[in-house]
Image (tube, rainbow, N blue to C red):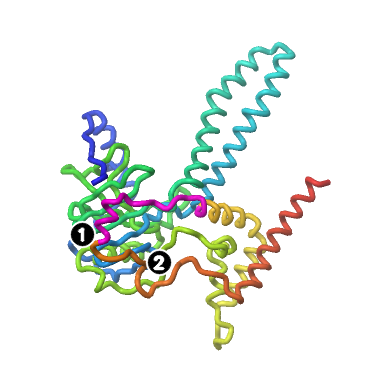
Amino acid sequence: MNTTEVRKMGWWARRVRKVSAYGPLDRAVRQWRSLGSVRNGTGTVPNGDALVYRMNATTLEIGQGANTFKGMIGLAGLSGFIVFAYALIVASPDFIGYAVSRKDWINVIVVLAFDIAGCIPFSLFFLTIFLTDFFGNTDALLRFDRVRRKVWMFVGTRSPIELDWDRLTPVSQGITPANSNINTFRSVLLVDLDAEGDVKFDGKYPRIASLGQTSLNEAQAISQYEYVRQFMEIGPAHLPSCATYLEHRTVFRDIVRFFGFLDLARNIDWRRPGETGGYGLVFASLFCMLLGWGILPFNLASYIAYRCNRIPKWPKDIDDYAKDGGAMRPPKGATSERLRIVFKEVPFIVLWVGCAFAVYAWFASWFIK
């Protein structure tokens, strides 16, 4: 099997890692809470919505939720690269030429040192962020094999790492942003621990699998884990049906969805008496009219990134194992999370996008004058 073996580490490397990456202090900051054993239920109703890509009788394929801001991070990387590349290619030569003409050799040395120590490394760093985000993989997939009791996860561009399901420890992780003491984002991790209770590493990669996207609701994060746990323990026949399933490619509607505000227009039924969603839609319209010009470029960047990204391809031996359970398909009865535009959304799309382009035209007018 084309999997990676766990490499032993030296004493010093183990000590450094123990007090830093996923050591006791790090786990306390990340607010880890054990969920017991994978053999025992959590008492939460399983929920596989927006979690599963494909499945069959023996194999479940889900995402790790690591690409929530795909395209947006790449756009920031591209902006940083342009800034430092401009400083390196345009600004620095002009300044050096001016300093040489005045025989100001000290400033020449300072600028050259800044280029070598600052502009070149940072431009390469931001370029790497852009290329990785726009031309990497669509998602870091996880595959669960209930017959072999194995879990395979993608990390970077390496071959999948193999985990033993029965040796994994499920934990609920909470992360509180530095600028907030109220909102805590929750997720469930499957962690491979050693005899001392520290996280095992495969080279530089921690043997940790993240299930689905983070959520402000801990019960929602645990319900996704419970869906996976029940699949591995009792099989797919007893699982509740999923409302939606994941797809690797985006659609045009994702560009004009405006962080989910367009769903308000989709879900309102104007024929229903006492419909109360209109107030939320009015607020959403005002928000998108005023700030849609700032949201639209990031949505477009995310759309392009998902279109340019590669879909991870499993090694042949892992794909052959999945064939034991039949063809891999989306959950039965579920619909794609990538929705198409319906007619009642069109007026709002035209209004919000039109306001965004009006702002762009106003900005452009300042450069044309």
Q: Quadrant of residue 278?
A: bottom right
Asked whether 317 or 262 is in front, the reply is: 317
Q: Main secondary structure of the magenta part?
A: helix
Q: Is residue 337 magenta?
A: no
Residue found 49% across the figure and 66% down from its top: 338
Closer to the camera: disc 1 or disc 2?
2
Q: CA distance from mark 1 to mark 2?
A: 24 Å
Q: Is residue 46 left or right of residue 125?
A: left
Q: Magenta segment, which residues?
A: 306-323
Asked whether 54 or 40 is in front, the reply is: 54
Residue found 63% across the figure and 63% down from its top: 288
- Identify residue for label 2: 245
Name the amino acid type tagged 1: Val
Query: Image height check: is 324 above or below 200?
Result: below
Q: Residue furthest right?
A: 369
Residue found 70% across the figure and 14% down from its top: 100
- Identify residue for label 1: 38
